Amino acid sequence: MAEASRWHLGGTPKHKLRYREDVEIRTTLQELLLYSIFLINLCILTFGMVNPHMYYLNKVMSSLFLDTSVAGEERTNFKSIRSITDFWKFMEGPLLDGLYWDSWYNNENLYDLKNSSRIYYENILLGLPRVRQLKVRNGTCKVHSFFRSLMDECYDKYTSKNEDTADFGLKQHNEWKYSSPRTNSPWHWGFVGVYQNGGYIFTLSKSKSETLNKFINLRLNSWITRGTRVIFIDFSVYNANVNLFCIIRLVAEFPATGGILTSWQFYSVKLLRYVSFYDYFIASCEIIFCIFIIVFTIQEIKKLKELKFAYFKSIWNWLELLLLVLCFSTVFFSLYSNMQIYRMIGRLLRNTEKYSDFYFLAYWHIYYNNIIAITIFFAWIKIFKFISFNKTMSQLSSTLSRCIKDIIGFAIMFFIIFFAYAQLGFLVFGSQVDDFSTFQNAIFTQFRIVLGDFNFAGIQQANRILGPIYFITFIFFVFFVLLNMFLAIINDTYSEVKADYSIGRRPDFQLGKMIKKSYNNALEKLKLKKPETDEDKKRMENKDLAEKARREGFDEKEIQSAEQMKKWKERLEKKYYSTEIQDDYQTVTQQEFRDLFLYAVELEKELHYVSLKLNRVMRKVSALQY
């Protein structure tokens, strides 16, 4: 007994181990609390940037310029344009009517029209709208020798090398002369090409009649030619009621195949960010966000110096670095967009007789919104780092971490088959079905098929033999076989994790216990709950363990035996492993020796019972093998 006591005192004292655990748990709890404040601040910051009126402003503007039909032709609007004739009808009809609001519905003038038009009487047209055309040169492609007698002109698709920069037509005004692109203007990604700035440009007039005459003149003198590849219609409006700018771009692409493809962009953005008291509250949240970035950066630098290369072995540390990069990118985009806005917006608003290019400002503002959206997404993902205080969430985390290798192996096999089917669909149906018109479309179409969204009639009509074969085999192998294999991997791993947790091989949820303990202490101090004694706690703990054992199939005799052994164990630990022991020698009473002997006997019974169980299992395994 003296040897045991000396061994115990020579190791790490139990109270010191508990102290270290408490310090670690408190540190984790403080980190969780700090990160929760950061996450709440980030949510306020991001949701404060979004205004519900943005959607409604986009909706009314798109309805006006996209859905309004040509007078006398109900089916002709911007969305349905398919020919040059339809395009000029739209320009001379719905576009003019949408841009120029000369009077109130009863023909009364409610404002001074010399400043600007007011769309829907609430949205001020900023500057003058602009129309811009990009063309390609003749001879940018080759005509086959068989057809040179029929056609000697060839206009390829648009690229910067194929672009036509020569003056054409009347050559008298700017719309017939090429204007060089601006270096800071973003390119436009369309359906059939990527288009730079510049081209053949003209601005509309403040007078509706003058603009109509301009359109008629351009139409009669063939401003749109065979070399035309795209036409942009750009303008911006401002609504002071909701402090929002709406930057609008209508695009008509003229592919080399003929016809017209229309697209559009409506960006409702808040360029003047600090106007109301709520805006200044959001500004304070931005300052707090920057302070948090500095604090987290210092923490990660200290951790990196302490752990060195071992720092990069944890996936959570990689997530921390990714979050910091995103946060710094957010700050950079915010500063750059604000600088550009305050540098350009005054000049743009003063030049009311020219086109006000707010598209550049909206472009950077949209990038800022995108980067902060990605940042808050990964900020929420980081919450999983602190899920060890909850058993259910810890099971989820353990399941995913344990089956990651199987999932990676399965993903390789899945995407081999998936991409094989995508290429098959693209080659067989690409020229007939819009969903398979490109390889990227074919990939996303197959994901939609897995979710139950598919167009079987279109596939069957494109190829009556390969269509049904493709569809049936894809559904069978991908949906019924591969997806069920994936679910089986997750299910089996979850069963293993749950079994390990049931027999005690699970993490110690000390953080959850500390949160619960702090909550109970707070209720006791507020006198909302009676203080619990140690006996009450032990009684509740034993009751919970007994209920769990009954649910798992143990009989009452086994439960009572386990409770008796636990009492003996606690009594012995309290007597011989207490941190208050200072003497190297202590006497053992006859009652204590009897309790120790009975405890050893019960242990021997349990070991014998376990041995019998193992022998029975091994005999069954041997019988199955033969």
Image (cartoon, rainbow, N blue to C red):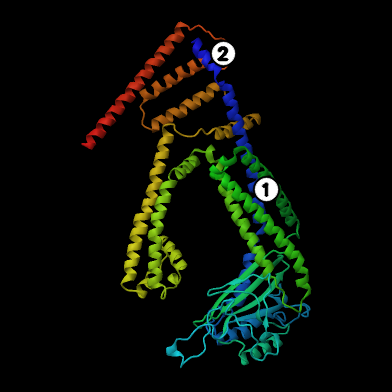
Q: Is residue 157 visible?
A: yes
Packing grade of label 2 (10 A; few <14, some 14-19, many >=20) is some
Packing grade of label 1 (10 A; few <14, some 14-19, many >=20) is some
Residue at image location 65% in from the left, 43% down from the top = 301
| Residue linked to disc 1 | 293
Residue at image location 74% in from the left, 62% down from the top = 339
Q: Is residue 75 visible?
A: no
The span from disc 1 to disc 2 (Cα, nearest Å) is 49 Å
Q: Residue furthest front?
A: 145
Residue at image location 34% in from the left, 59% down from the top = 477
Q: Amino acid at mark 1?
A: Ile
Picture quarter with the C terminus = top left
**In this view of the protein, which residue sits in the foreground, 509 or 368?**
368
Task: Please provide percent x and percent y for residue 57.
Answer: 64, 68
Residue at image location 42% in from the left, 35% down from the top = 500
Q: Is 620 drawn above or below residue 292 in the view shown?
A: above
**Left or right, 324 with reference to 353:** left
Q: Residue furthest left?
A: 626
Task: Please provide percent x and percent y for residue 235.
Answer: 67, 75
Task: Please provide percent x and percent y for residue 367.
Answer: 63, 62
Q: Are marks 1 and 2 in contact (CB under 8 Å)?
A: no
**Dot placed on the residue nearer the N-terminal end, 1 or 2:** 1
Helix, strand or loop at mark 1: helix
| Residue linked to disc 2 | 581
Helix, strand or loop at mark 2: loop
Q: Is 73 drawn above or below residue 415 in the view shown?
A: below
Q: Amino acid at mark 2?
A: Ile
Q: Can you tell which quarter of the image residue 363 is in?
A: bottom right
Foreground mark, 1 or 2, reads 1
Task: Please provide percent x and percent y for residue 163.
Answer: 59, 80
Q: Can you tell which quarter of the image residue 599 is in?
A: top left
**In this view of the protein, which residue sits in the foreground, 274 or 325?**
325
